[in-house]
Amino acid sequence: MSEPWAPPSLEPVLSVRKLARSYQSGHETLEVLRRVDLDVRPGEIVGLIGPSGSGKSSLLHAAGLLEEPSGGEVWVDGEECLALSDAERTRTRRAKIGFVYQFHHLLPEFTALENVALPQMISGVKKKDAKAEAARLLTMLGLKDRMEHQPAQLSGGEQQRVAIARAIANHPRILLADEPTGNLDPATSGNVFQSLFDLIRIEKVAALIATHNHELIGFMDRVFTLRDGHLERVRVSAR
Protein backbone atom coordinates (compact mmCIF):
# COMPACT_ATOMS: atom_id res chain seq x y z
CA MET A 1 0.00 0.00 0.00
CA SER A 2 1.40 3.43 -0.91
CA GLU A 3 2.33 5.86 1.82
CA PRO A 4 0.24 9.05 2.04
CA TRP A 5 1.71 12.18 0.54
CA ALA A 6 3.61 14.61 2.71
CA PRO A 7 1.52 16.99 4.83
CA PRO A 8 1.37 20.68 3.85
CA SER A 9 3.49 21.53 6.91
CA LEU A 10 6.61 20.31 5.09
CA GLU A 11 8.67 22.89 3.25
CA PRO A 12 8.13 22.93 -0.53
CA VAL A 13 10.86 21.41 -2.67
CA LEU A 14 9.71 23.47 -5.66
CA SER A 15 8.25 26.96 -5.50
CA VAL A 16 7.51 29.32 -8.35
CA ARG A 17 6.62 32.91 -7.59
CA LYS A 18 5.04 35.46 -9.90
CA LEU A 19 6.23 33.40 -12.86
CA ALA A 20 5.60 35.03 -16.23
CA ARG A 21 6.24 33.82 -19.76
CA SER A 22 5.41 35.65 -22.96
CA TYR A 23 6.18 35.01 -26.61
CA GLN A 24 6.29 37.42 -29.50
CA SER A 25 4.17 36.42 -32.50
CA GLY A 26 4.54 39.02 -35.21
CA HIS A 27 3.28 42.30 -33.72
CA GLU A 28 1.39 40.48 -30.98
CA THR A 29 2.65 39.44 -27.52
CA LEU A 30 1.22 36.15 -26.28
CA GLU A 31 1.26 35.87 -22.48
CA VAL A 32 1.03 32.17 -21.55
CA LEU A 33 1.97 32.57 -17.86
CA ARG A 34 0.82 35.55 -15.81
CA ARG A 35 2.39 35.83 -12.33
CA VAL A 36 1.90 32.15 -11.46
CA ASP A 37 2.51 30.98 -7.87
CA LEU A 38 2.84 27.26 -7.04
CA ASP A 39 4.41 25.05 -4.34
CA VAL A 40 5.10 21.29 -4.55
CA ARG A 41 6.10 19.33 -1.44
CA PRO A 42 7.93 16.02 -0.92
CA GLY A 43 5.82 13.03 -1.92
CA GLU A 44 3.07 15.23 -3.36
CA ILE A 45 1.72 14.83 -6.89
CA VAL A 46 0.47 18.06 -8.46
CA GLY A 47 -1.26 17.84 -11.81
CA LEU A 48 -1.50 20.37 -14.63
CA ILE A 49 -4.32 19.80 -17.08
CA GLY A 50 -5.48 21.68 -20.12
CA PRO A 51 -5.29 21.64 -23.90
CA SER A 52 -2.13 22.02 -25.93
CA GLY A 53 -0.95 25.62 -26.00
CA SER A 54 -2.37 26.50 -22.59
CA GLY A 55 1.08 26.93 -21.03
CA LYS A 56 1.63 23.60 -19.26
CA SER A 57 4.94 22.89 -20.98
CA SER A 58 6.12 26.47 -20.48
CA LEU A 59 5.52 26.13 -16.74
CA LEU A 60 7.33 22.78 -16.62
CA HIS A 61 10.27 24.07 -18.64
CA ALA A 62 10.65 27.08 -16.36
CA ALA A 63 10.31 24.97 -13.21
CA GLY A 64 12.89 22.53 -14.59
CA LEU A 65 15.37 25.33 -15.39
CA LEU A 66 15.26 24.39 -19.06
CA GLU A 67 13.88 27.72 -20.21
CA GLU A 68 14.24 31.16 -18.67
CA PRO A 69 10.87 32.80 -17.98
CA SER A 70 10.06 36.41 -18.74
CA GLY A 71 9.85 37.19 -15.03
CA GLY A 72 9.42 35.74 -11.56
CA GLU A 73 11.33 33.31 -9.38
CA VAL A 74 11.97 29.55 -9.30
CA TRP A 75 13.03 28.12 -5.93
CA VAL A 76 14.46 24.59 -5.72
CA ASP A 77 15.27 23.22 -2.27
CA GLY A 78 15.27 26.72 -0.80
CA GLU A 79 17.52 28.26 -3.45
CA GLU A 80 16.35 30.83 -5.98
CA CYS A 81 17.69 29.43 -9.24
CA LEU A 82 17.08 32.14 -11.82
CA ALA A 83 19.79 34.26 -10.18
CA LEU A 84 22.33 31.46 -10.69
CA SER A 85 24.77 31.23 -13.58
CA ASP A 86 24.06 28.88 -16.46
CA ALA A 87 26.58 26.39 -15.09
CA GLU A 88 25.06 26.51 -11.61
CA ARG A 89 21.57 26.00 -13.00
CA THR A 90 22.82 23.01 -14.98
CA ARG A 91 24.32 21.50 -11.82
CA THR A 92 21.07 22.03 -9.92
CA ARG A 93 19.05 20.48 -12.74
CA ARG A 94 21.30 17.41 -12.90
CA ALA A 95 21.41 16.91 -9.14
CA LYS A 96 17.84 17.68 -8.12
CA ILE A 97 15.43 17.43 -11.07
CA GLY A 98 14.26 14.36 -12.98
CA PHE A 99 12.32 14.50 -16.25
CA VAL A 100 9.85 12.13 -17.91
CA TYR A 101 8.61 12.96 -21.40
CA GLN A 102 5.86 11.64 -23.67
CA PHE A 103 8.49 9.83 -25.73
CA HIS A 104 10.89 7.72 -23.71
CA HIS A 105 14.13 8.56 -25.63
CA LEU A 106 15.85 5.36 -24.50
CA LEU A 107 19.22 4.46 -26.01
CA PRO A 108 18.35 1.63 -28.43
CA GLU A 109 21.68 -0.20 -28.26
CA PHE A 110 21.57 -0.60 -24.47
CA THR A 111 19.46 -2.85 -22.25
CA ALA A 112 16.81 -1.54 -19.87
CA LEU A 113 19.24 -2.02 -16.99
CA GLU A 114 21.99 -0.12 -18.79
CA ASN A 115 19.64 2.73 -19.75
CA VAL A 116 18.87 3.29 -16.06
CA ALA A 117 22.45 2.74 -14.85
CA LEU A 118 24.16 5.07 -17.35
CA PRO A 119 22.89 8.42 -15.97
CA GLN A 120 24.09 7.38 -12.53
CA MET A 121 27.54 6.46 -13.85
CA ILE A 122 27.77 9.81 -15.64
CA SER A 123 27.08 11.43 -12.24
CA GLY A 124 29.96 9.52 -10.70
CA VAL A 125 28.27 6.44 -9.24
CA LYS A 126 30.30 3.25 -9.48
CA LYS A 127 29.12 0.81 -12.15
CA LYS A 128 28.27 -1.92 -9.65
CA ASP A 129 26.23 0.44 -7.48
CA ALA A 130 24.52 2.03 -10.49
CA LYS A 131 23.42 -1.37 -11.80
CA ALA A 132 22.17 -2.39 -8.35
CA GLU A 133 20.04 0.75 -8.07
CA ALA A 134 18.79 0.31 -11.63
CA ALA A 135 17.77 -3.27 -10.85
CA ARG A 136 15.97 -2.13 -7.67
CA LEU A 137 13.94 0.50 -9.51
CA LEU A 138 13.10 -1.71 -12.48
CA THR A 139 11.97 -4.48 -10.12
CA MET A 140 9.72 -1.99 -8.30
CA LEU A 141 8.23 -1.08 -11.66
CA GLY A 142 7.46 -4.70 -12.54
CA LEU A 143 10.35 -5.20 -14.97
CA LYS A 144 12.44 -7.73 -13.03
CA ASP A 145 12.33 -10.20 -15.94
CA ARG A 146 12.85 -7.57 -18.67
CA MET A 147 16.01 -5.82 -17.46
CA GLU A 148 18.31 -7.40 -20.03
CA HIS A 149 16.04 -6.56 -22.96
CA GLN A 150 16.76 -3.71 -25.35
CA PRO A 151 14.04 -1.08 -25.96
CA ALA A 152 12.95 -2.66 -29.27
CA GLN A 153 12.15 -5.85 -27.35
CA LEU A 154 9.90 -4.03 -24.89
CA SER A 155 6.30 -2.86 -25.22
CA GLY A 156 5.47 0.84 -25.18
CA GLY A 157 4.37 0.65 -21.56
CA GLU A 158 7.54 -1.19 -20.56
CA GLN A 159 9.70 1.37 -22.34
CA GLN A 160 8.00 4.20 -20.47
CA ARG A 161 8.53 2.39 -17.16
CA VAL A 162 12.25 2.24 -17.99
CA ALA A 163 12.16 5.99 -18.68
CA ILE A 164 10.52 6.57 -15.29
CA ALA A 165 13.20 4.48 -13.55
CA ARG A 166 15.88 6.46 -15.37
CA ALA A 167 14.36 9.76 -14.22
CA ILE A 168 14.34 8.60 -10.57
CA ALA A 169 17.72 6.82 -10.61
CA ASN A 170 19.81 9.79 -9.44
CA HIS A 171 17.39 10.45 -6.55
CA PRO A 172 16.09 13.85 -7.67
CA ARG A 173 14.14 16.02 -5.28
CA ILE A 174 11.67 16.95 -8.03
CA LEU A 175 10.13 14.94 -10.84
CA LEU A 176 8.68 16.84 -13.80
CA ALA A 177 6.61 14.85 -16.28
CA ASP A 178 5.18 16.19 -19.54
CA GLU A 179 2.41 13.93 -20.88
CA PRO A 180 4.18 10.82 -19.53
CA THR A 181 1.46 8.48 -20.82
CA GLY A 182 0.37 10.52 -23.84
CA ASN A 183 1.76 7.99 -26.32
CA LEU A 184 0.06 4.95 -24.75
CA ASP A 185 -3.35 3.30 -25.07
CA PRO A 186 -5.80 3.91 -22.17
CA ALA A 187 -5.28 0.57 -20.41
CA THR A 188 -1.48 0.79 -20.60
CA SER A 189 -1.62 4.46 -19.61
CA GLY A 190 -3.41 3.64 -16.36
CA ASN A 191 -0.97 0.86 -15.47
CA VAL A 192 2.10 3.01 -16.18
CA PHE A 193 0.71 5.92 -14.19
CA GLN A 194 -0.04 3.62 -11.26
CA SER A 195 3.64 2.57 -11.33
CA LEU A 196 4.71 6.21 -11.46
CA PHE A 197 2.32 7.10 -8.61
CA ASP A 198 3.64 4.30 -6.37
CA LEU A 199 7.28 5.19 -7.05
CA ILE A 200 6.72 8.86 -6.23
CA ARG A 201 5.15 7.90 -2.91
CA ILE A 202 7.90 5.45 -2.00
CA GLU A 203 10.77 7.71 -3.02
CA LYS A 204 9.07 10.84 -1.59
CA VAL A 205 9.74 12.90 -4.69
CA ALA A 206 7.88 16.15 -5.32
CA ALA A 207 6.10 15.64 -8.65
CA LEU A 208 4.60 18.12 -11.10
CA ILE A 209 2.86 16.33 -13.96
CA ALA A 210 1.24 17.82 -17.05
CA THR A 211 -1.39 15.76 -18.83
CA HIS A 212 -4.45 16.17 -21.02
CA ASN A 213 -5.78 12.79 -19.82
CA HIS A 214 -8.54 13.59 -17.33
CA GLU A 215 -8.76 9.93 -16.31
CA LEU A 216 -5.47 10.38 -14.47
CA ILE A 217 -6.74 13.23 -12.29
CA GLY A 218 -7.74 10.79 -9.54
CA PHE A 219 -4.07 10.00 -8.94
CA MET A 220 -3.26 13.62 -8.13
CA ASP A 221 -3.21 15.29 -4.72
CA ARG A 222 -3.92 18.70 -6.23
CA VAL A 223 -4.83 19.60 -9.79
CA PHE A 224 -4.65 22.93 -11.59
CA THR A 225 -5.58 24.13 -15.02
CA LEU A 226 -4.10 27.12 -16.83
CA ARG A 227 -6.67 29.59 -18.07
CA ASP A 228 -5.54 32.83 -19.72
CA GLY A 229 -2.14 32.39 -18.11
CA HIS A 230 -3.48 31.97 -14.57
CA LEU A 231 -3.54 28.81 -12.43
CA GLU A 232 -6.99 27.67 -11.33
CA ARG A 233 -7.55 24.87 -8.81
CA VAL A 234 -9.58 21.88 -10.01
CA ARG A 235 -11.58 19.75 -7.58
CA VAL A 236 -10.28 16.18 -7.35
CA SER A 237 -12.52 13.25 -6.45
CA ALA A 238 -11.08 10.54 -4.19
CA ARG A 239 -9.74 7.47 -5.98
Image (cartoon, rainbow, N blue to C red):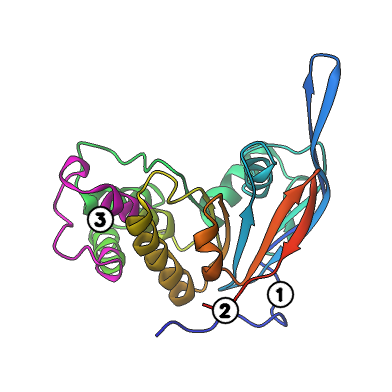
- In the picture, measured across the screen, residue 56 lies left or right of residue 196, that is right
Tell me where the magenta segment starts and ends, as one range: 138-163
What secondary structure is found at the residue carrying circle 1? loop
Residue at which label 2 appears: 238
For marks 3 and 2 on the same chain, the one whose residue lies earlier in the sequence: 3
What secondary structure is found at the residue carrying circle 3? helix
Q: How many marks?
A: 3
Q: Is 39 located above or below residue 34 in the figure?
A: below
For marks 1 and 2 on the same chain, the one whose residue lies earlier in the sequence: 1
The image quadrant of residue 83 is top right
Residue at which label 1 appears: 11
Residue 205 part of the magenta-drawn span: no
Residue 153 part of the magenta-drawn span: yes
Between 28 and 71, which is closer to the camera in this rendering?
28
Residue at which label 3 appears: 127
Rendered image: mark on residue 59: none
Q: Residue type at mark 3: give it.
A: Lys
Contact between labelled residues 2 and 1, with CB atoms less than 8 Å apart: no
Between 40 and 11, which is closer to the camera in this rendering?
40
Between 140 and 28, which is closer to the camera in this rendering?
28
Mark toward the viewer: 1 or 2:
2
Q: Residue type at mark 1: give it.
A: Glu
